[in-house]
Amino acid sequence: MTKILIVDDEPHMRMLIQESLEEFEERGIVLLTTDNGDEAIASVRKEKPELIILDVMMPGMSGYEICNTVKNELGMKDIFVMMLTAKGQKQDKKQGMDVGADMYITKPFDPNEIVNKVAEILKIDIQAS
């Protein structure tokens, strides 16, 4: 069963991403959400999602730290990490890539872009729905 984990401390942002990805749920993909780093790491360990959509700026553990933990400390290199953040500077992007992020998208974003990227990552033809 394919799983996507959405990690963002802002409830409206989690909701927006979840609503954007609803059509994937209709195809049996499970959408999981959490609002902090500790829960995100616990969820990754338990659920082993194929994809993590990860905010960078969060209280406690940042998205960079979560990504580093998943990719480097836990060695789960096969999990695709899409960082979604308002931090769009070159050094922010570099920091994301340095900790193992596979993709870096800046907010505000077009929900259709997220849908298309997720379809591409999970190799799902969304036109067929």
Image (cartoon, rainbow, N blue to C red):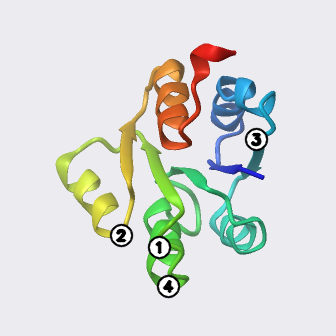
Q: CA distance from mark 2 to mark 3?
A: 27 Å
Position of residue 56 measured from the top left corner of the image (x, y, whole percent): 46, 53
User: Residue 12 appears in which quarter of the rendering?
Assistant: top right
Residue that protrudes farthest toward the bottom in the picture: 73
Whether residues under marks 2 and 3 lie with C-beta atoms below 8 angstroms apart, the answer is no
User: Of residues 34 and 102, which is closer to you in this image?
Assistant: 102
For discs 2 and 1, the disc positioned in front in the rendered view = 1
Q: Position of residue 114 (x, y in %)?
A: 51, 30
From the image, state whether disc 1 or disc 3 is nearer to you: 3
Q: Which residue in the structure is indicated by mark 4?
A: 73
Name the N-terminal-most of marks 2 and 4.
4
Screen quadrant of the C terminus: top right
Residue at the location (76% across, 49% down)?
A: 32
Q: What is the three-letter code of the residue carrying label 3?
A: Ile
Vertical arrangement, residue 31 with respect to residue 57, above or below: above
Numbered tag placed on residue 108 in the rendering:
none
Between circles 4 and 3, the one closer to the viewer is 3
Q: Report whether 44 appears left or right of 83.
A: right
Report, in whole angstroms, how far the alpha carbon at label 2 lies from the one at label 4. Answer: 10 Å
Horizontal and vertical percent position of residue 8: 62, 48
The residue wearing badge 3 is 29
Give amino acid for label 4.
Glu
Front tag of 2 and 3: 3
Q: Residue at x 53, y 74 (%)?
A: 76
**The residue under label 1 is which amino acid type?**
Lys
Tag 3 or tag 1, which sits nearer the N-term? 3
Distance CA(mark 1)–CA(mark 3) = 22 Å
Q: Which residue is mark 1?
A: 71
